[in-house]
Image (cartoon, grey):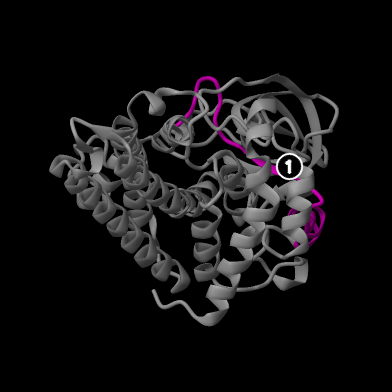
Amino acid sequence: MLFTEQHDELRRSVRRFVEAEINPHIDAWEDAGQFPAHEVFAKLGAQGLLGINKPEDYGGMGLDYSYVAAFAEEIGNCDDGSVPMAIGVQTDMATPALARFGSDELKREFLAPAISGEAVACIGVTEPGAGSDVASIRTTARRDGDDYVIDGQKVYITNGVQGDWVCLLANTGDGPVHRNKSLICVPLKAPGVTVEKKLDKLGMRASDTALLHFDGVRVPQKNRIGEENEGFTYQMIQFQEERLWAGFTVLRPLEKAIEETIEYTRERQAFGQSILDNQVVHFKLAEMQTEVELLRSLCYRAAEQLVAGEDVTYLASMAKLKAGRLGRQVIDACLQYWGGMGFMWESRIARLYRDMRLISIGGGADEVMLQILCKYMGTLPARRNR
């Protein structure tokens, strides 16, 4: 991928924002269990950073996805994974389908304030009984006059505690499970919506995550994104940007982990020499840096395909799979070289160890990525290749 001076200027702007508005506060936000999403998103929105590839008619910049890729890579310079994840929910998980398939009225009501940062968005797919198996969700939205009446639960909802609206996947028909679902914009202050619980997580501590309950929630049918019962397809398309976001946003954390490990092992002495002087250490760090560069190349290639309007499911699934695997392997190897310091809760490498573990779970587990890849490769058993 060829980046221009405009891409580089965007990168510099994002880096300055992270250094001034996010990193100085990370420790306090981690201790508090959430960051002030409305405050941070309003500042991002004021700089146009929440609508980089969204239509100008709704406050976006109208740029192509290559600029989102540059933004996502740079936002990875945050000193935790929580804030980049929450931002990604707003820009690349809850709003792509709305921007692509939503009506003008719906985009003015929900997309425009998400782009400006006035509203915090979240995506509601996972349920207590349906995670990576999206087709098995049980939340329903039944027609009643001009409204939908929604009943069900959604769990592990990033931004759900502070959110203003959710892009909700619900069953709107009785047909085949891949053709009976719709995406609906649901205000989280609507009667019948309850934040049952703010969830206590292993990592991503500064990002609020909710268990949401919907009990007879009434919303107009005009809040539906696109055609009725096409929501599963829309969500599968939307997933590709979510998975690429995961790939791009892990690049800098992995590199910084390697860089900081080099600095630490160069200073740390054992048996009369620095830890870094051991061939097994510096060779391992070189191998890991190579893996990170390969992931970057994969992500760039997928981004080029997306800009060209091609289906990126194959490469995005690979990128998501590799991002999750490297998030575990690289950070675990680096932590080992930090010794006892790496096991301390307050150390940055320990925080990365906790945060990166989610990448192999959220947005489709590693095993789902492998199943998708096998389907594209034609290696699934016939009964499952559907």
Give the residue type at disc 1: Ala
Residue drawn 51% across the image and 42% down it: 179
Give how far across and how far down residue 166 sits, in percent. Answer: 70, 40
On the picture, is 109 further left or further right than 70?
right
Give how far across and how far down residue 240 sits, in percent. Answer: 46, 53
Q: Does residue 134 appear in the picture of this structure?
A: yes
The quarter of the displayed image where residue 357 is located: top left
Residue 119 belongs to magenta span = yes
The quarter of the displayed image where residue 321 is located: top left
Q: Quick one: 358 or 150, which is closer to the camera?
A: 358
Q: Quick one: 296 or 230, which is closer to the camera?
A: 296
Residue drawn 21% across the image and 47% down it: 282
Task: Provide the residue designation for mark 1.
Answer: 37
- The image shows residue 297, relative to residue 243, as above or below, that is below
Residue drawn 75% across the image and 39% down it: 36
Q: Within 10 angstroms of label 1, few (less than 14), some, or many (20 or more) residues?
A: many
Q: Quadrant of the C terminus?
A: top left
